[in-house]
Image: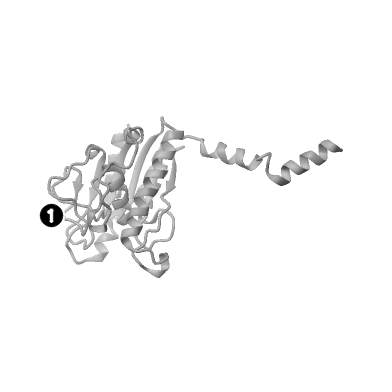
Amino acid sequence: MLSNVLTFSLLASGALAIPLDVDIEKRVTCSNVHIFGARETTVSPGYGSSSTVVNGLLSAYPGSTAEAINYPACGGQSSCGGVNYSASVAQGIAAVASAVNSYNSQCPSSKLVLVGYSQGAEIMDAALCGGGVPNQGYTNTAVQLSASAVNMVKAAILMGDPLFKAGLSYEVGTCAAGGFDARPSGFYCPSASKIQSYCDSSDPYCCNGNNGATHQGYGAEYGSQAISFVRSKLG
């Protein structure tokens, strides 16, 4: 009887921590390929328009896994909590670093892929390449991913990235200018060979165009090309 009472007391107090053990087991389940997706501004939590590439890769690599970056994805709108764009970018960069570094520390042999769309591309870009986002008051220029995580990031797909700057080796599309947070002349990303960044000239966010519909079309226009690029990097 005493044993039963003690067991009940431990369960009631949480001292046996059985749910915690289950949670830890889930967290350390590693896949060969793990994909991180970051959505665009004002889109509900999830992958947003990055889902075209994320889902394509999940289909191409059976057994692969994916997770969405948890950040505001906001530009001051009430629908996303009123967080201003600069604060959302800063929180997003930190969220990318936390998610990628944490997964890599638990699964050091897993190959990692980053996929970001619009603001989601900007936070992926800044976390992987460093350089900060000075237009948004983010002045930390260091690469935010650990050296180990950077080594295991095999590919990064950026679509409609406000940091887009024509002339960088990994830029793809018809834009000959840059986004509203464009990288400065002479910028160099140490992971350039792992990246493709897509932007067309009529896009008003990653370039200097005036057609907002262009900004929403990269999945349809470049999705297959992006998936082929990632596959070439994953082997």
Name the image quarter holding the N terminus.
Answer: top right
> In which image quadrant can residue 6 be found?
top right
Question: In the figure, is residue 136 to the left or right of 44?
Answer: left
> In which image quadrant can residue 149 be found?
top left
Question: In the figure, is residue 122 to the left or right of 8?
Answer: left
Q: Residue 83, position in %: x, y?
A: 38, 63
Q: Residue 99, position in %: x, y?
A: 42, 44
Q: Residue 196, position in %: x, y?
A: 24, 44
Question: In the figure, is residue 49 to the left or right of 208?
Answer: right
Which residue is denoted by mark 1 in the rendering? Answer: 176
Frontmost residue, 223 versus 145: 145
- The amino acid marked with disc number 1 is Ala
Frontmost residue, 53 versus 98: 98
Question: Callout 1: few (<14), some (14-19), or many (20+) C-alpha neighbours within 10 Å?
Answer: some
Q: Residue at (41%, 33%) from the top-left corner? A: 110
> In which image quadrant can residue 169 be found?
top left
Q: Residue at (39%, 61%) from the top-left corner? A: 43
Name the image quarter holding the C terminus.
Answer: top left
Q: Which residue of the protein is positioned furthest toward the top in this rendering?
A: 109
Q: Which residue of the protein is positioned furthest toward the bottom in this rendering?
A: 78
User: How many numbered discs?
Assistant: 1
Frontmost residue, 9 versus 129: 9
Q: Residue 34, position in %: x, y?
A: 41, 39
Q: Residue at (30%, 39%) from the top-left corner? A: 155
Q: Residue at (32%, 61%) from the top-left corner? A: 85
Colouring chosen for the image of the structure: one colour
Disc 1 on helix, strand or loop? Answer: loop
